[in-house]
Image (cartoon, rainbow, N blue to C red):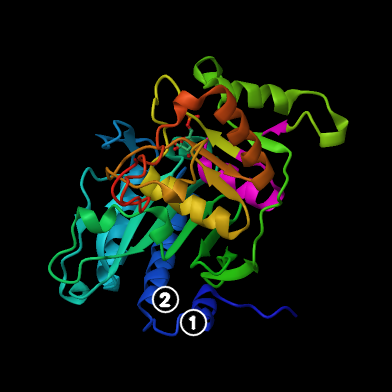
Amino acid sequence: MAVIKTLGQFIIEKQADFPYAKGELSRLLRDIGIAAKIVNREVNKAGLAEILGDAGTVNVQGEDQKKLDVFANMQFISALTSGGECCIVATEEEDEFVPIDSPVSKNAKYIVCIDPLDGSSNIDVNAAVGTIFSILRRKSVEGMATLEDVLQKGTEQVAAGYVIYGSSTMMVYTTGKGVNGFTLDPSIGEFCLSHPDLKVPEEGYIYSINEGNYVHFPEGVKKYLKYAQAEDAATNRPYTSRYIGSMIGDVHRNLIKGGIYMYPTTSSSPKGKLRLMYEGNPMAFIIEQAGGTASDGFNRIMDIVPTELHQRVPVFIGSKKMVDKIEELMKEYSPENNLNAPAEKTLEQLNIVGGID
Ligand code: P6P
């Protein structure tokens, strides 16, 4: 009889990994888990409740908000407010970040960047949707936290995770010590450890991309697609194409089976479609912790210095060898597409005293 280990038990057990932690991060993860169970209940009966369809509002991205988007956003903000461990919520559904100014959050030191319901256009057709979250520690030490506390590189994340509301509901997260997956057991209302120490296969044979945008892809992406579709038994090509229209669904499958998810620049998304703070960075942290790679085509996503709350980023994420291949082709055929090239190192940074002779 396998011993059930709940998310709560696992978090407490792993708390020993953080000797200086006083339990705040553990409680924050618990709060997110609680909100996820409430969102899961609504997603699972979306077809029944009057919660399908458009909310009649538009978010900062100019996308129609679905009623479930708005519901999920409210649930996570509410859980994070009452949990008391979070001082700011940056969410896809709000133009500005949401300061959490409640008596219990006075000394809260964590910031949560969240996409409350990614892939929500899939809700009405019953395809996988999910929540993506990234946890940062505020840098400022007094007063209200500010946007500067939010705009930190992905390497500064203390935790990241997603909840996939699919054929089963799973939470997958990392605190920088590997990746673990928990499946919701509705009979006891608990997320239970089901996928310990997840690792993404170094090589994969599945690629995920919206080929409808082919005409406007960078040349390096076009070259990669031709490479993926070429006949070569020795390297298991042609690969298989799988595209759910929900990043979480595609990245989760590729995490389990191996593969690459790509959302390059397109004519309608000249800087990429996915957002750095609450899609690119958290998924990059998870995939890197599972042994994979996450790139904008040229640079490690987690090294990109954010400048805007909702900034977008091209995403190539998954099996290391597949991402290495696309980076090779992007560098060769689309060098002009390198939108996040690190600023030229200054002479001081290069420790060249007195300049170059
Ligand atoms: P397209 C969902 O809106 C999302 O952000 C990702 O989850 C998904 O992979 C992508 O956009 C789908 O975009 O342009 O292919 O419909």
Q: Is residue 157 above or below residue 236?
A: below
**Residue contact between numbered discs 2 and 1, judged by CB atoms under 8 Å:** yes
- The secondary element bearing badge 1 is classed as helix
Q: Residue at x 33, y 32 (%)?
A: 63
Q: 350 or 336, which lies in front? A: 350
Q: Is residue 244 magenta?
A: yes
Q: Which quadrant of the figure contains the N terminus?
A: bottom right
User: In the image, what residue type sits under mark 2?
Assistant: Ser
Tell me if residue 74 can be seen: yes
How would you rate the neighbour count of disc 2 (Cα within 10 Å): few for under 14, some for 14-19, many for 20 or more? some
Q: Position of residue 238 (x, y in %)?
A: 78, 28
Horizontal side, residue 67 vs residue 265: left or right: left
Q: Give the magenta range.
A: 240-260
Q: Position of residue 268 (x, y in %)?
A: 39, 21
Q: 300 or 93, which lies in front? A: 300
Q: Position of residue 216 (x, y in %)?
A: 49, 17
Q: Determine which of the numbered discs, if any, sits on residue 55 in the image.
A: none
Q: From mark 2 to mark 1, how far is it between C-alphas?
A: 7 Å
> Which callout, 2 or 1, points at the residue further toward the start of the chain?
1
Circle 1 sits on which residue?
12
Horizontal side, residue 104 vs residue 292: left or right: left
Horizontal side, residue 277 vs residue 258: left or right: left
Q: Determine which of the numbered discs, if any, sits on residue 26 in the image.
A: 2
Q: 347 or 209, which lies in front? A: 347
